[in-house]
Each structure stands twice: as structure tokens, then as C-alpha cells.
Amino acid sequence: MTDRLPVVVGVGLTPFAASRDDCNVRDLAVEAVLACMHDAELESLHAIQHGLTSYESDHFNRQMTLGAILHDTLGLNPTPNVRVEGGGATGALALRTAWAYIQSGLCDSILVYGCETNGKSISSQTANQLFALSADVDWEMMVGGTYTAFYAAMMHAHMEKYSTKREHFAHVAVRNRRNALDNPNAQKPMDISIDEVLNSRPIAEPYTLFDCSLLSDGAAAILLSTEGWAKQHSPAFSVRPKVVFTATGCGTDTMRLGDRYPNLTNFAGKREAARQAYQMAGISDPLHEIDVAELYDSYSGVEIQAVEDLGFVSQGSGGPAIADGLFDRDGYLPVNTSGGLLGRGAPVGATGIAQAIEVVQQLWESVTPERQIHNARRGLTDTHAGIGTICVVNIFERRD
Amino acid sequence: MSDIDTRILSQLEKKTAQPKYISGQDDPWSAFRQVEIITLELIQQYKHSLGKYSRFFIELENGRFLGTKCSRCQTVYTPPRPLCSKCTKITDWHELPGTGSVKTYSVMHYSSNINDDVRVQAMPMVLAYVLLDGSSTLFPHLLRAENNEVHTDMRVHVTYNQGPVQHPIHLMYFAPLEE
Ligand SMILES: [Zn+2]
């Protein structure tokens, strides 16, 4: 199977923004795909054998069957298309699906493009109600619960069990927004202090406003193929480091937090996804064998839980490790150099793809010099839906 | 109100978008910079069955709190699961006394305001995950305590109210247990 491991041919991204009211969702997809086509130095999309559309919600995009519609908009007819949805993990699950399509021999090249209009086309109140529909419609949501509260209840349990401090996760809120200062595509770069995070208005305790990630408009695209297809069609492929999509894992957990009792602090589905991906990539010591990672920081504390569940540090020690700077840009394993969901933004269907783009560009050494991590050979993306209900870990490696 | 009502409410805005996201002088979309924005309103109404979970809600009217129990592995589920997720076995209804302990919680300063039952609540409010005595899982609901005073392992009990409510889950809430 290794001879069919997908290589990354090209990547494209729109800037993420609170409002792209100069575009509808089709326009966003077109912008990202054109950027991807130019990046791969293709004249057209005609040689691409398959399309894969990644988006979460008909409610947000005000359009059903966007798979077929975007495929048509891009001029990809009559090639086949598949649409992938997996909540917050949609973009990462889309890439994992594309991995399998190429490995199976179903196609030699596949264009994965994701988009979402989660920004100001609807009020944040309506957005929260729509996100609440992805929680349990007759129980947690109907009593008035929000995703912020479900995550907050998890973090509260983590704080009580492991003595994790608000200052620990405030470090994530500060660092990821500062990383975004060096990413021209980021939605909300900010230079704020730990105190400003702690003193911003409470949303669901212990989380305050600055612990929460963004609602965004945006799109992202990645072209994957076999190495043979890439050599034949993409002039760009042979002139930059070869990046291979080497491994993928997926794990799941209950929809409701309470059904996990007594395991309330962490993401069991993420541990399972990481276990599969590490086995596939031959990784036994992830902290030392991974050079750069994009983690799913939907809330600042989630990054603490992630570094534990991905096996970078032991269960319960994520808070002090993060506050010590282990995962800062000049730390041992830099994470969220893009700014993450907190600083760069999160148009759901594009998020997992954008995470992969940051990792791939780090391996290509093509990001802005200020945020470039040197000599990175292997990168990881961590993406999940719900409160870790579907978790996906994808691994990319430089092979030159 | 009709069952579905999709309307264009007003013509909100016409403008010329600035190519603020394009670097360099050449805007490839310069001929496409006129933008018109309208406001859409979609109202959708559903007959939403509570399905095999219905008896839980119906018994709340009678002041009874029900979970389900798997006769094979003895797991008690609150909220109920009609199918045991450990054994793939159909469960039985199982009444509980309605007392329990808070295991984790969050004080919410905003909520999804998903129905009128929530909209009438004063903010902030406490979302508590309660291990009901005799259950294996945690039940999430609002805890109405003075000054939102709450702590882990705090004793609470199910309090019933007569309604009317929009969603029958609000026929109950948690309150501190005086012991
Ligand atoms: Zn059972």
C-alpha cells in the first residue's frame, strides 16, 4: 500500500474572516480551489479524477447538496464527487476519506475542498442554537446547555482532578492569538495578556470570552494524489520537498458528557485516534517524533486535554507543561503556529483542511519567516466534533 | 404561522466590496465587486417525536423519575437508553428516588435560549451533571440554588413542577437537598 500513499500536490486557502459578505459559500470555495490550482501549477482542474466536498451544515450555508453544487460550480463535471460530514472534525474526516479513496485505487487524484459560512451572516445567538442542534436535542440542549458549557464542565472536572489552573489555559488563549499575528490569513490576531483573558467576561465558567474560539467565513482546499500522478501533472511537485500523508486515525465517544462518567476530564476518542495513527506511522514516542502540530483549540483548555490525549505528556500534566512553554513557537513541540481556532478562525468545513495546510506548509518551509519552524520532518493535525465525539488525527511527513 | 415560511424580509444593502483580501495591485475579480445583500428568514416547524424515550417525560408529570436498566450488565442509564450501549440489549424501565450528587458543572452566563422554558430563567444559571443515586451515568439539568452556590459532590434532588412548559424536560429541575 505504501506505493499509493497520497502526496500533497497543492494547497489553497481563503483568509478567514468574521464576515465575507462580498462572497457566498460558492465564491469562497472557488477562491480556495483557484489558490490550490495555482499552488500546484496546474493549468486547469481537468486532470483531477475525483472531487470531495467538506462542509458541516446546510443550516449555516443556506443550501443543501452543496457537494454536487460546488462540484458543478468548479467545473468538475462529470467526474465523481462525495460529500463528507463529521461535525467539527469534518475537514479532517474529509482528508481521511480522500486518503482511503487513493489507497483503494478508486482514483489517483482527489481535490478536497471545504467551506463554511459560520460568520456574521447569522447572529451568534442563532449560531449557538444551530450548534446546539448538534448536541442532544431532547436533553442537554433543551435544558439550555451550550457547547461552551459542556466543554466548561469537562474543564472544571480536569481542574478539580489535576489541579489545573485558569492561568494554564489562559496561556493557550494568549499564545495562539499571538501566533496569529504572523499569519496574514488569520481572522483575529491579538496581543493580549494572561490577565486580560482571566478578566474578560465569563461565558460558561471557568471559560471567559477570550478562552473561546471564533465564528468564521472561509474555505480551504488540498489536492492529493499518487506520486505518479503528481509527477505527471504538477510542475510544482518536483521542485519542493515531497510531503506524504502517511497516517490517519479516527476514534469516537458518547455524545453526552454524562454518559462517560467517571471519565469526565479527557477525550477517549482522541486517544484511540492517536493510537491508530501512531501505529500506522510507526510512532512510539510522539513528543519526540513529531515536530509540529495543529491542535483543535475550540476552547483554550481543550489544548491542555489534547496534549495529554495525544500522548505528548501524561494525563493531568498538560496544564503546567503548556504554561512552561513546551508547546510555544520556540518550545519543544510548537503547536498552532497558524493561530489555531482561537486566532486564525474556524469555518467548520474548512478547519481540518486549514490545519493540514499549516502543517504541510511548515514541512515545505513556505510559511512567513516569523512563524517558520526549522527542520520539521513530521507534522500532526488533531480535529474533533462535539466534545470529542468524533476525533481524527492525520499525520504528514516530509520525505526527501 | 404556516409550517414553513421562507421570506425575503428586506433588501438590506448594496455596496461595492473592497478587495481587502487580495494582495498586489491586480484584482482578478474586479468585474465582480458589486455586491447585493438580502435578509432571508426561514421558519421551520416539525412534529418531533420523543420516541422510545417518551415514557421518561410522561412519568415526570406523575412526579416519578425513570431511568433504564440493562438486565444483563446491570447498568442504569439516566437519561434513559432504550438499547444498552455495552450489551446491545434492549433495556427495562427502572425507577429511581431522584436524589443524587453533583459530579461536575458550569455556571452559564449565556444559554442557547432554545425554548421559552430557558428564556424565562434568570442568568447566570448552573448546568449540573448529577449522579442520581442508583444510576451509572450523569444526568444534565439546571440546578436552582440560592446565589448559584454549587460544589462537586453537593447533594441535590429532582424537583417536579406542574408546567405548563414548552419542552417536557422542564417538568423537572435540580434543587439542593436539605439533609
Ligand atoms: Zn448491558
Image: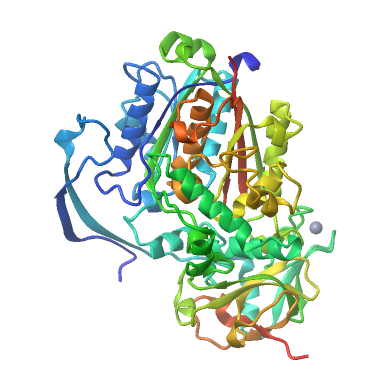
Q: Quadrant of the C terminus of chain B?
A: bottom right
Q: Give the image quarter of residue A125.
A: bottom left
Question: Can the viewer see residue B55?
Answer: no
Quadrant of the rendered image holding ligand 1: bottom right
Residue located 20% across and 29% down the image: B26
Residue located 79% across and 76% down the image: B133
Left or right: residue A189 versus residue A290 is left
Q: Residue furthest bottom?
A: B178
The residue nearer to you, when weighing A362 against A57, is A362
Q: Give the image quarter of residue B54.
A: bottom right
| Number of marks drawn | 0
Residue located 65% across and 16% down the image: A2
Instruction: Residue A222: give x, y in percent of width and height.
Output: 45, 28
Q: How is the image coloured?
A: rainbow
Left or right: residue A143 versus residue A349 is right
Question: Can the viewer see residue A169?
Answer: yes
The residue nearer to you, when weighing A339 against A178, is A178
Left or right: residue A250 versus residue A358 is right
- A334 versus B141 height, above or below: above
- B23 versus A195 height, above or below: above
Instruction: Residue B100: give x, y in percent of width and height.
Output: 75, 78
Residue located 57% across and 58% down the image: A170
Q: Quadrant of the N terminus of chain B?
A: bottom left
Instruction: Residue A65: give x, y in percent of width and height.
Output: 39, 41
Instruction: Residue A51: give x, y in percent of width and height.
Output: 43, 28
